[in-house]
């Protein structure tokens, strides 16, 4: 993540650029200088996840109540000293960073293989040195922070650029994260989350200026240095020979800092000694061996330029490369001419003039491509333009909208009451207007607002560019008994695609296709899986998205729920599911879907899932924290992750259907605890009675049998009879399977790539995979 080798270099060679700071003192100082503004820290949440996840157990699917409590303590600590936190999450993977994303996912696969090898060898959780964050942690952290009343934003690209832009333009106290790119951006101070102590509110602050002094550079040189060293945009090998040439001619090599450290010093020396001599006179391509990589290199340098900034290394725009001199709106001429006062530091560089290329008309830099305005640092909440909310008639709050000057219409938003306004999101200059999968500008604005405010999950990604991704899951590539979650939930996603994009008409040779970058065993990730929508049969047909999302008709909420159940192919079980009380309704929906889809799940598994959900309702966080397990089962580890991935799938479906359920219905801290499930699984596997699983609590016994009956009845409607493990036969592969039965059921249709390892590539609609489900082995 970030600039290659820079973090280690700073720690070993430049400790003087690190200063211990106390957030309480920084807030008091900031408040004295800006009494009209609340001290604000912008948090790169993706960098913080592994540091926020403090529960001892991480292997069983997540200790969600412990984690929620830890987030609560984190927020309270800052609130107590008057600091406001703004959280940013990655909302997109940029195309120029896809290769790096793939590289990390493949590396994670190797780590997961080692984890399962350790579990099978030792029957215990590996040490923290092998820590792997639980599945779904990022998405559920968003919802947790929103539940805690925090402002939580989801980026329209990778979050680091928007974090840096927000911090600079809002005069924030600083950025809290762990990414060396924050050394490079010319923005507010950068604080380390890895060095943060919650009790004392102390951490390390890094100084860009002192780093530059050590390297003999100017702050404006840092983007150039970052690209020459290699980062998420520029592959490390692109300038490898150049770096070694710099090192061979470097005369001040230091033996105590290693090869990587000396390379950083040597490249910095070349910039300051050679390139500075010709700065402003020669083009970079005349001074560096850019070759065919010229456009990518310029793009990499420009990616660090925040709104209003320019690079002294650009004499003019390299042909075909867009920098901040040309800002292209992402959404069809939508403008807002709101004048909102800035709360600025007198010494800050607001209103920075632009350097323009003569061949382009000058355009004003704006903090958001759709808004030609400055973003307020301290605003009066009553001054915001508003439109009425829908979705729930009792909601009275208002939401500001963007106005399309061509139609002069306002967009009613169908969302949760927490949404107050659509904050300006700072976009990298190279973000060009794109052709979207859905052309309706009103629908795109609604989806975009949900996305930006972390209300929805993946919906905007699907309708804007038809591309989504899912990172690694704790799945054992050597265990063929359980299909990958990527395949199990694919039919659900396909029905969502049909809802959002429409389907392939009978006999049509073309139609919408979604690119899925899902990590699963056997997938080399050379290409995305190209996945077609799967048509649903709905009474009365499928409503348009504007009706589904924006209608205030009372009957529409019922139809939204009908569509959600149809996405899981559970329309026939609506009556039974309506009898289940919250928050177990969503879990019940998932269990029915899972047991219909995966024949290798047995009655003991069902007992464990239901028992843990019921027992969880009466457990305190402290009790769950002190729970001890006899041993760790690799199968139970996979089942825990599988269920949590199902909850994230529910988040997607609920978003796409216009929010028929409140998010609390499928938040893991309400329905799942990893250790508690593991305990119930081990007990159930040993044949313990239901009364023992329920801890002799008679009040839970009736609920247990009711939930079990709902799941079993729904499965029987699909000809799936859930039986105990003693009714199964063991196959030579070691899988659990029923004789005469496929182990996986799907109606999915996928276009694969040659040699990509699709298990049922090129099958027509309604076809099933081979008799026994198996993961692909071809690479």
Image (tube, rainbow, N blue to C red):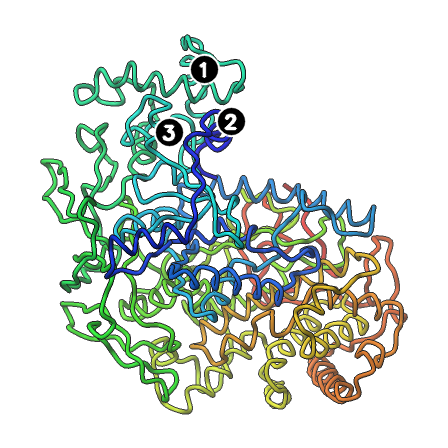
Q: Using the image as rendered, state which of residue 135 and residue 534 is in the foreground.
A: 135
- Residue 244: which numbered mark, if any? 1
Mark 3 or mark 1: which comes first in sequence? 3
Residue beneath the point at 54% across and 39% down? 103
Question: Which residue position holds label 3?
Answer: 211
Residue 300 versus residue 381 in the image, above or below: above
Residue 17 position in % (x across, y down): 41, 32
Residue 271 position in % (x across, y down): 31, 19
In-image side of 107 versus 162 (left or right): right
Mark 2 or mark 3: which comes first in sequence? 2
In-image side of 157 versus 564 (left or right): left
Q: Residues within 10 Å of mark 1 (few under 14, many from 20)?
A: some
Residue 360 position in % (x across, y down): 12, 41
Between the residue at mark 1 and the residue at mark 2, the CA separation in whole angstroms equals: 21 Å
Between the residue at mark 2 and the residue at mark 3, the CA separation in whole angstroms equals: 13 Å
- Please tell me whether mark 2 sits on a helix, a strand or a loop: helix
Q: Nearer the viewer, mark 3 or mark 1?
A: 3
Q: Taking the image as drawn, is residue 741 in sight?
A: yes
Q: Residues within 10 Å of mark 3 (few under 14, many from 20)?
A: many
The quarter of the picture where the C terminus appears is top right
- Please tell me whether mark 1 sits on a helix, a strand or a loop: helix
Mark 1 or mark 2: which comes first in sequence? 2
In-image side of 128 versus 665 (left or right): right
- Residue 12: which numbered mark, if any? 2
Badges 1 and 2: C-beta atoms under 8 Å apart? no
């Amino acid at each position: 993540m970030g600039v290659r080798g820079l973090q280690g270099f700073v720690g070993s060679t430049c400790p003087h650029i690190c200063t211990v700071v106390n957030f309480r003192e920084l807030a008091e100082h900031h408040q004295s200088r800006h009494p009209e503004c609340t001290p604000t820290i912008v948090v790169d949440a993706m960098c913080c996840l592994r540091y926020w996840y403090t529960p001892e157990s991480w292997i069983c699917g997540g200790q969600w109540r412990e984690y929620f409590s830890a987030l609560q303590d984190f927020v309270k600590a800052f609130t107590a000293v008057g600091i406001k936190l703004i959280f940013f999450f990655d909302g997109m993977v940029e195309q120029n960073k896809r290769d790096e994303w793939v590289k990390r996912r493949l590396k994670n696969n190797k780590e997961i293989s080692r984890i399962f090898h350790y579990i099978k060898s030792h029957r215990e959780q590996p040490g923290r040195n092998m820590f792997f964050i639980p599945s779904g942690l990022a998405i559920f952290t968003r919802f947790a922070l929103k539940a805690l009343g925090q402002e939580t934003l989801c980026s329209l690209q990778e979050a680091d650029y928007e974090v840096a832009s927000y911090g600079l333009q809002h005069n924030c106290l600083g950025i809290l994260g762990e990414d060396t790119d924050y050394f490079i951006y010319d923005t507010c101070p950068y604080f380390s989350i890895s060095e943060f102590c919650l009790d004392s509110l102390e951490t390390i602050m890094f100084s860009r200026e002192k780093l530059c002094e050590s390297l003999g550079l100017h702050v404006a040189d840092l983007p150039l240095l970052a690209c020459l060293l290699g980062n998420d945009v520029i592959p490390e090998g692109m300038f490898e020979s150049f770096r070694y040439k710099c090192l061979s001619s470097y005369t001040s090599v230091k033996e105590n800092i290693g090869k990587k450290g000396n390379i950083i010093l040597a490249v910095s020396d070349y910039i300051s000694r050679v390139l500075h001599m010709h700065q402003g006179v020669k083009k970079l391509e005349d001074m560096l061996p850019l070759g065919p990589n010229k456009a990518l290199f310029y793009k990499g340098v420009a990616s660090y330029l925040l709104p209003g900034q320019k690079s002294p290394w650009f004499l003019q725009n390299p042909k075909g490369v867009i920098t901040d001199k040309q800002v292209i709106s992402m959404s069809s001429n939508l403008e807002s001419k709101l004048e909102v006062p800035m709360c600025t530091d007198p010494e800050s560089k607001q209103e920075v003039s632009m350097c323009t290329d003569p061949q382009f008309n000058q355009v004003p830099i704006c903090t958001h491509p759709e808004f030609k305005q400055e973003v307020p640092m301290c605003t009066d909440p009553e001054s915001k333009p508003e439109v009425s909310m829908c979705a729930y008639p009792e909601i009275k709050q208002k939401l500001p909208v963007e106005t399309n000057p061509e139609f002069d219409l306002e967009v009613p938003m169908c969302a949760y009451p927490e949404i107050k306004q659509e904050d300006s999101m700072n976009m990298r200059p190279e973000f060009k207007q794109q052709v979207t999968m859905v052309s309706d500008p009103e629908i795109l604005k609604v989806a975009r607002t949900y996305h930006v405010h972390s209300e929805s999950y993946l919906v905007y990604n699907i309708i804007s560019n038809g591309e989504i991704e899912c990172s690694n899951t704790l799945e054992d590539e050597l265990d063929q008994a359980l299909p990958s979650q990527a395949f199990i939930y694919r039919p659900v996603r396909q029905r969502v695609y049909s809802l959002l994009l429409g389907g392939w008409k009978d006999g049509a040779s073309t139609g919408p296709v979604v690119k899925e970058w899902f990590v699963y065993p056997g997938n080399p990730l050379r290409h995305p899986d190209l996945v077609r929508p799967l048509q649903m049969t709905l009474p009365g047909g499928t409503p348009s998205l504007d009706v589904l999302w924006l209608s205030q008709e009372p009957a529409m909420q019922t139809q939204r729920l009908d569509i959600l159940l149809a996405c899981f192919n559970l329309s026939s079980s609506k009556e039974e599911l309506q009898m289940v009380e919250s928050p177990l309704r969503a879990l019940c929906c998932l269990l029915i879907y899972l047991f219909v889809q995966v024949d290798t799940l047995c009655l003991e598994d069902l007992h464990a899932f239901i028992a843990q959900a019921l027992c969880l309702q009466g457990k305190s966080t402290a009790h769950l924290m002190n729970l001890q397990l006899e041993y760790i089962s690799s199968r139970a580890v996979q089942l825990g992750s599988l269920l949590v991935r199902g909850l994230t799938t529910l988040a997607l479906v609920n978003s796409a259907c216009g929010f028929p359920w409140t998010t609390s219905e499928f938040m893991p801290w309400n329905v799942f605890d990893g250790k508690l499930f593991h305990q119930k699984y081990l007990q159930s596997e040993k044949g313990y009675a239901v009364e023992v699983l329920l801890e002799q609590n008679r009040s839970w016994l009736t609920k247990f049998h009711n939930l079990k009956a709902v799941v079993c009845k729904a499965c029987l409607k699909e000809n799936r009879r859930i039986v105990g493990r003693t009714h199964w036969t063991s196959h030579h592969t070691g899988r659990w399977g029923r004789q005469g039965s496929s182990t996986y059921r799907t109606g999915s249709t996928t276009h694969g790539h040659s040699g990509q390892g699709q298990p049922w590539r090129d099958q027509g609609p309604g076809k099933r995979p081979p008799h026994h489900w198996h993961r692909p082995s071809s690479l």
